[in-house]
Image (cartoon, grey):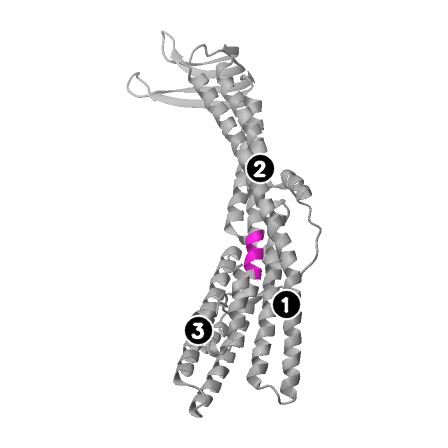
Amino acid sequence: MRKQVLFLTIFFFISNPMLRAEDNFLVQDKNKMNPEAGALSAELKSEEEISLTLAEAIAIALRDNRDILLKTEEVKKAKLKISEAQSSLFPTLNFTGSWTNTRGSYTKDTSQNSAQIGLKQYLYKGGKIINTIQYNGYNFEIAEAVLDKAKLETVLNVTNAIYTLLLTKEFNILNKSILDNTKEHLKFVESRYKSGQASESDTLRIKESLGSVEEAYEVSLNQIEAVSSLLRNLLYLDDKVRIQPKAQFTYEPIELAYDEGFLRAMKQRPEIRQYEAQAQANKKSIEMVKADSRPNIYASWDYYSRSHLAGATGLTKNWNDYNVIGLTFSWPIFDGWATKAKIEQAIVDAKETQLTKEKVIKDIALELKNAYLDLKDAIAQLKAKEAELALYVDNFKVVKEKYDKGIASSLDLNDATIGFRVAEFNKVQTIYDYILAKARFNKATGGI
């Protein structure tokens, strides 16, 4: 409905030179340099301008976007957590050494030395070690899924920004054409007013319309800058960089199958993998807590070496070396039901994960359905816009023939040209809707 109102409003302007201020809705871009923006144009010439294809923009975003870089670091941290958990499989080795010196206790100051080496190896910890390793393994999968989700969202956002910037530039060109045409109408009305063929009210109305069109043109420039800023932020580029998108509004027919898309989404969407891994991690978390109430068994070996003072006839220094080998068994009998409370908390976490997963599946299905319907609507509207464009192309040809024969004025030709450009833009906007709906559909299925 919004696009229909947009078109009807522009058509009213074309067919009626006495345009009211609110009748120009083509205000959605800014950045096509032209004589009306001389100061801005001079400024842009002093700034860096780069041309980017969609693939290049996506590659830069995946490389430099800070959200993705942060998620990448989280993946590295999760991988290191696995190594940390695996360290419990190996024995621990500790060395302790000391040196003491007696001053004033004996006729001669004497020093003493001691050293201890301890080796400890857990044989059984109630299953905590293996479950901790697996728990951190599932957390690693979660971190990878979150990273993939950030990539999907970034790709969609960059695609949206690139094509929105391209569309706003098309809007800007159209707004400039409408502005020039309005000025021509003003000249025409003023000439008629001078010759007594038009009233002063007619002149005031067209001047009011011109002011509205000029404002719309300036707003469209600001909107281009807003979209450019968004794209620079996604690509993490400097504020002075001006981006020129190298893309085209092309329509490629595709076969739509919602059921296949849904099945693909259930396999590929990062959120599904994330919560499946989270569910497994919760199971391991419960086992880790249960291990606190199970027995622990470890073997140990300690070697001691120390010197000491002894002897009735005087001071002597002797070394005492000995080994201790042990097997220790411990079992926490009662902890005030702390372990029981922790287990119940872990079970609640598992239930919350399951509920969240079910909600995510519903949300994905809704997202996929909306993208599917938007895609179908865009495909259906393309046929109508092509027929509409054909009508205005024919109208332009008729007016052009009349103009060549001297039957139609230059203003008539300008109006026909604007009508053709508006119809052409309406088709471009529908293709834009199709491209973004297709991007959303691909994202909803988990594809990049």
Residue 422 visible to an observer of this rendering: yes
Q: Give the labeled residue for mark 1.
A: 388
> Which residue in the rendered view is the most extreme toward the bottom?
195
Secondary structure type for disc 2: helix
Q: CA distance from mark 3 to mark 2?
A: 49 Å
Snapshot quadrant of residue 385: bottom right
Q: Earlier in the sequence, mark 3 or mark 2?
A: 3
Snapshot quadrant of residue 415: bottom right
Name the spot of residue 390 as percent of width and height, x first. 67, 70
Q: CA distance from mark 1 to mark 3?
A: 25 Å
Say few, some or many: other residues with alpha carbon within 10 Å of mark 2 (under 14 / 14 to 19 / 20 or more).
Answer: some
- Residue that appears at 65% across and 38% down: 267
Q: Give the labeled residue for mark 3.
A: 20
Is residue 429 magenta-colored? no
Name the spot of residue 237 as percent of width and height, x first. 51, 60
**Which region shows up in magenta?**
156-163
Q: Is residue 435 above or below residue 107?
A: below
Q: Give the labeled residue for mark 2.
A: 361
Callout 1 amino acid: Glu
Q: Earlier in the sequence, mark 1 or mark 3?
A: 3
Secondary structure type for disc 1: helix
